[in-house]
Amino acid sequence: MPESLSFDAGKSEVLEFEVENVRYEYDRIPALQGLSLRVRAGECIALLGANGSGKSTLLRLMDALYFACKGTLRFRGTALTEAAMEDDAFALGFRRRVGLVFQNPDIQLFNPTVFDEVAFGPLQLGWPRAEILERVHATLAWIGAEHLKDRAPYRLSGGEKKRVALASVIVLDPDVLLLDEPTAALDPRSQSQVIDLMESWNNGKKTIITATHQLEILGEISRRAIVLEHGVVVADASPDEILANTELLESANLIHSHRHLHGGLTHKHTSPYLRHEHRKPD
């Protein structure tokens, strides 16, 4: 395994998350194996890793959908435990401040219309009717989906579903946005639209944590990149440093190399971001 990188995220006074030696298992199969990291307020972080690296599991723990088997995960100093989430005052405040957008929007979208979908969160939090109507209309306008408000979510395109899922969380104006593969399986135009929405929502005061394996969008969605492998952090650095580390990316299965003979030389391809080399066969 390549030597781990470290990254000083700055000296923000507010710690959103403290993850200390967290372990999580699915039916005794480890997903996170003593993972530790800190997230400061206002950071834009990309969680990188291949399938099974622990990205989605970590996001679900940060959203208090799962709870650590061992170790501690704190949000603003309070441990996220089942007992904490049974406290209505804490749970309501937490749900207002932290939002998760799932990788598959079909899991998240279940209401009869797009309007109902975006209004669902505010209704659950007991907002006044006038405020809900105003906020939902404003959010639909922001994502360019006012014309879809009466449409059933199942009738939307993949890109439209992603945008509506994002809107259903953004409508609450959370302090922390957790995104699980927000641009996966989208065509280039839809991918660009989702990235633009993420960038326009973040005003420098919001915290965004995005799980992805798409290296081509890394510089657009993050200022800090954390690489996970087998449920632990193996690198924590700037996007440029991560992209320049071929050995790390290959070890984490984020890129692959293939070799073939060409003109008496072994020709090695890695990634469009990385070096392209020739050498004589051994």
Image (cartoon, grey):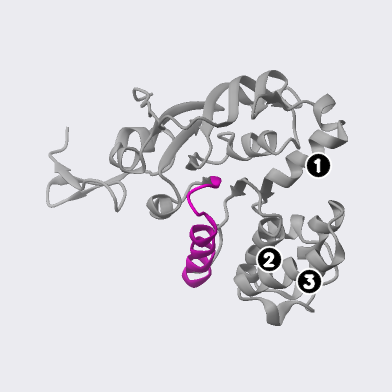
Cα gap from disc 1 to disc 2, whole angstroms: 22 Å
> Residue 229's x, y, as percent?
50, 30
SS at circle 3: helix
The residue that appears at 53% across and 27% down in the rendered structure is 38
**Residue in front for this viewpoint, 227 or 125:** 125
Residue type marked 2: Val
Residue type marked 3: Phe
Q: Earlier in the sequence, mark 2 or mark 3?
A: 3
The residue that appears at 62% across and 34% down in the rendered structure is 58
Q: Quadrant of residue 130?
A: bottom right
Q: Is residue 193 magenta?
A: yes
Q: In the rendered view, would you say 205 is above or below 14?
A: below
Cβ–Cβ below 8 Å for labels 2 and 3? no
Residue range (magenta) = 188-208
Q: Which residue is mark 1?
A: 92
Q: Is residue 49 magenta?
A: no
Q: Please, what is the dominant secondary structure of the magenta stretch?
A: helix
The residue that appears at 66% across and 57% down in the rendered structure is 170
**Residue in front for this viewpoint, 107 or 171:** 171
SS at circle 2: helix
> Residue 233's x, y, as percent?
49, 27
Q: Which residue is mark 3?
A: 115
Cα gap from disc 2 to disc 3, whole angstroms: 9 Å
Q: Which residue is mark 2?
A: 164
Q: Earlier in the sequence, mark 1 or mark 3?
A: 1
Mark 2, Cα crowd under 10 Å, few <14 / some 14-19 / many 20+, is: many
Q: Quadrant of residue 117?
A: bottom right
